[in-house]
Image (cartoon, helix red, strand yellow):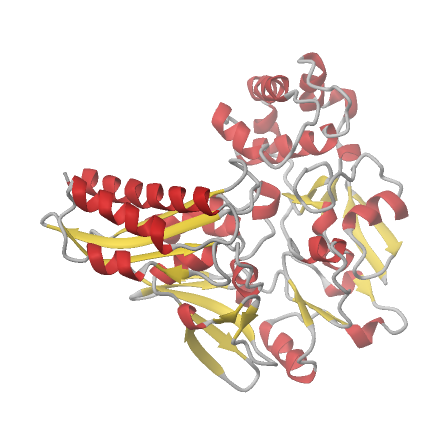
């Protein structure tokens, strides 16, 4: 495949395989070795670059999705004249140096969007970039030093024009047109899917490359649906919100309709990986991959969401509670894709929550997740829905807890009993005591917060 894109302000061309990682294109084909490989799974940030102005892990971006893009690596900065890099040196933030290229680019991505972040914002922005020398305090001080120097304000004047992949920036070679498909819109994608029902769809690819690393076979055919505008819309309708399956978790986190009506979804989206992962991972991928540890399904269960499944000839709607037929299995038919998610707007006064627990605060796979929805009127809780994830092949409702709480006043005794019932209702295969105990505590936390807000 002949690939063309802009690298550090210069047009470049490379002969690559469509599924080569952008990381390998940069290092092996173009000899830009400032970008490092650490984990190869999007967890360490050593390979961070800016793709069309957004921070991404280049180990998770297929070459075919870099077509026509604007890529910035550490080599594209101004060296000693770059105030951010100089701040890292002057604050002693550079130790072994392996993580620093990705760390600098993550900081740059933050400052171009938010020129004056506080310490918490800096920590959040860099949470996806690991420093094995544990020099975080000096790294944070270096970013703060660049803030004081006005680095972010000057970056605002230099931001590249954001654009999606352009098919004219790639030429497929040999047999590649038989197994690589690059639709320009949803109609083209559905037409291709109708002829190749066994094709693998590529979007954010945040699970795709980690699966290949774990020796999952490379697909025989792929279709790139990343960047299709028909799948990216977040639209507020009369009585529901519709989210395109290609909407990223960054887009969801900053969507005003989502923030207004579904704060728990904002909370869940902001906990999925670091910034570079959130810029790529999509809500559709989180659902269709059908991982038992996926964060979004339990929340959509309690929000009573409906999934819109589309093929060339038919559109059908399926409640999210009926979407999973087993572990890693869904009711998607051949020739179908997930087009969007419809979530009914909650009535005023309804409360929702999402909690997850893992081995660490950021970049963690859920060891358990709990989502809930309820209304409280006159001190009485009604319309209770509680679902848990990561402890069974598919999310499950805590039906007995729901039935017990419905119509109750939230007294200390009711909350204590509901917490106990919740801990007894789950049956995780591993770390059972821990997961049971934490499930009960999270239910108690939600009910106490619910009572305090009513009080």
**Residue 437 location, x and y as percent?**
38, 42
Residue 253 seen anywhere in this rendered image of the structure: no
**The C terminus lies in quadrant:** top left
Residue 184 seen anywhere in this rendered image of the structure: yes
Residue closest to the eye, 237 or 284: 284
Q: Is residue 78 above or below residue 39?
A: above
Residue closest to the eye, 168 or 45: 45
Q: Is residue 389 left or right of residue 453?
A: right
Q: Residue furthest bottom?
A: 313
**Residue 344 location, x and y as percent?**
32, 64
**Residue 156 location, x and y as percent?**
58, 34
Q: Is residue 178 above or below residue 123?
A: below
Q: Is residue 288 left or right of residue 178?
A: left
**Residue 409 location, x and y as percent?**
13, 48
Q: Is residue 324 left or right of residue 355?
A: right
Q: Quadrant of residue 157?
A: top right
**The N terminus lies in quadrant:** bottom right
Q: Is residue 154 above or below residue 384?
A: above
How many numbered callouts?
0
Q: Is residue 105 left or right of residue 258?
A: right
Residue plotted at (48% across, 59% down): 392
Residue plotted at (51% across, 58% down): 283
Q: Residue furthest left?
A: 378
């Amino acid at each position: 495949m002949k690939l063309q894109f802009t690298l550090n302000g210069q047009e470049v061309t490379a002969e690559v395989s469509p599924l080569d990682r952008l990381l390998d294109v940069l290092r092996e084909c173009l000899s830009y070795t400032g970008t490092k490989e650490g984990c190869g799974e999007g967890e360490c940030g050593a390979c961070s670059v800016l793709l069309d102005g957004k921070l991404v892990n280049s180990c998770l971006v297929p070459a075919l999705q870099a077509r026509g893009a604007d890529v910035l690596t550490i080599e594209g900065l101004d060296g000693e004249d770059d105030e951010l890099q100089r701040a890292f040196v002057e604050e002693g933030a550079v130790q072994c140096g392996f993580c620093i290229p990705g760390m600098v680019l993550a900081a740059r991505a933050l400052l171009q969007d938010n020129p004056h972040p506080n310490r918490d914002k800096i920590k959040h922005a860099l949470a996806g970039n690991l420093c094995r020398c544990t020099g975080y305090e000096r790294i944070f001080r270096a970013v703060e030093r660049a803030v004081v120097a006005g680095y972010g304000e000057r970056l605002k004047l230099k931001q590249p024009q954001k654009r999606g992949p352009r098919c004219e920036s790639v030429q497929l070679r040999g047999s590649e047109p038989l197994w690589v498909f690059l639709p320009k819109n949803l109609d083209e994608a559905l037409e291709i899917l109708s002829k190749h029902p066994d094709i693998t769809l590529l979007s954010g690819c945040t699970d795709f490359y980690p699966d290949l690393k774990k020796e999952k076979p490379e697909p025989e055919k792929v279709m790139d649906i990343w960047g299709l505008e028909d799948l990216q819309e977040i639209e507020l309708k009369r009585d529901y919100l519709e989210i395109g399956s290609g909407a990223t978790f960054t887009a969801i986190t900053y969507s005003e309709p989502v923030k207004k009506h579904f704060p728990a979804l904002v909370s869940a989206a902001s906990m999925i990986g670091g910034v570079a992962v959130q810029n790529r991972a999509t809500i559709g991928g989180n659902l269709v991959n059908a991982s038992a540890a996926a964060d979004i399904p339990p929340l959509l269960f309690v929000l009573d969401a409906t999934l819109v499944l589309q093929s060339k000839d038919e559109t059908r709607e399926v409640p999210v509670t009926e979407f999973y037929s087993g572990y890693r299995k869904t009711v998607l038919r051949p020739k179908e894709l997930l087009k969007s998610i419809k979530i009914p707007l909650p009535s005023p006064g309804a409360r929702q929550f999402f909690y997850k627990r893992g081995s660490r605060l950021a970049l963690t796979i859920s060891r358990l997740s709990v989502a809930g929805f309820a209304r409280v009127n006159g001190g009485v809780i009604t319309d209770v829905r509680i679902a848990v994830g990561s402890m069974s092949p598919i999310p499950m409702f805590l039906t007995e807890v729901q039935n017990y709480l419905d119509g109750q006043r939230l007294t200390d005794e009711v909350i204590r009993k509901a917490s106990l019932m919740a801990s007894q209702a789950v049956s995780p295969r591993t770390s059972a005591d821990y997961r049971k105990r934490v499930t009960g505590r999270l239910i108690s936390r939600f009910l106490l917060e619910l009572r305090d807000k009513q009080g």
